[in-house]
Image (cartoon, rainbow, N blue to C red):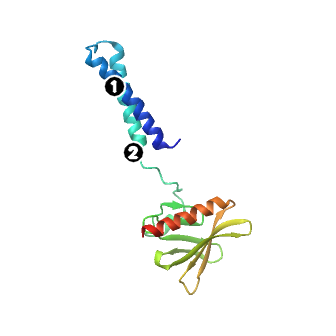
Amino acid sequence: MSRRLAGIVIVSIGAVALVVAGRFLSTGQVGRPGSIVVLLLGLAVAVTGLVLALRQPALNIKQGHAAFHVPGFNPTHAAKHIAIEGKTGRLWVRDNQRGERVVEPEQLLAWRVHFDDEKYGIEVTTDSTEEPILFARTGERRESADEWVARIAESRQKS
């Protein structure tokens, strides 16, 4: 269950508890010990659910990631050899043979999943005359490379 869905369920439970507490208050049974407890519990549960439902998910990036050391590059997604700024479409690529580089969206000509020496990765074609093709490893699973292809395509649509 996603955090957002869990938050909505918890808000609903808190809302029910607040309705029950409201019934106690409307019938003049405020003095009953359970009415105050239900009111406070319902309020606490509803607020907790709202925080879960509305809070932005934390970025899944380790603080020591190499892409963080590139001045002016603020990745929204990062792996060991590739990172992307989702809003701008800028791509950081570390190629084991050719070094690392930030590729601007207008420099990116093509990208595809590539299999190299038992590892999957993203092969990036740029307009550079020196290093037109870069290869960023993404791991042993095809799914991780497919996720990166989707992220790149999505960022291209935004820019």
In the image, is residue 144 above or below residue 157? above
Q: What amino acid does circle 2 point to? A: Leu
Given residues 105 and 69, the one toward you in this image is 105
Q: Residue at (36%, 15%) from the top-left corner?
A: 34
Can you give x and y, in whole percent of width and height, for residue 7 in the image? Answer: 44, 39
Res. 44 image quadrant = top left
Query: Distance from label 1 to label 2 (Cα)?
Result: 22 Å
Q: Which secondary structure lies at badge 2?
A: helix
Which residue is painted at 42% across and 49% down in the image?
Answer: 56
Q: Nearer the viewer, mark 1 or mark 2?
A: 1
Mark 1 lies on residue: 19
120 displayed left or right of 12:
right
Earlier along the polypeptide chain: callout 1 or callout 2?
1
Residue 10: image location, x then y, percent: 43, 34
Residue drawn where x is 35% and y is 29% of the image: 43
- Does 5 appear above or below 17? below
Taking 105 as reference, is 133 left or right? right
- Which one is in front, 42 or 27? 27
The kind of residue tagged 1 is Val
Quick one: label 1, few (<14), some, or many (20+) residues within 10 Å? some
Asked whether 64 or 156 is in front, the reply is 156
Q: Which disc, if any, is residue 54? A: 2
Q: What element carries label 1?
A: helix
Q: Position of residue 91 (x, y in %)?
A: 51, 70
Number of marks in the image?
Answer: 2
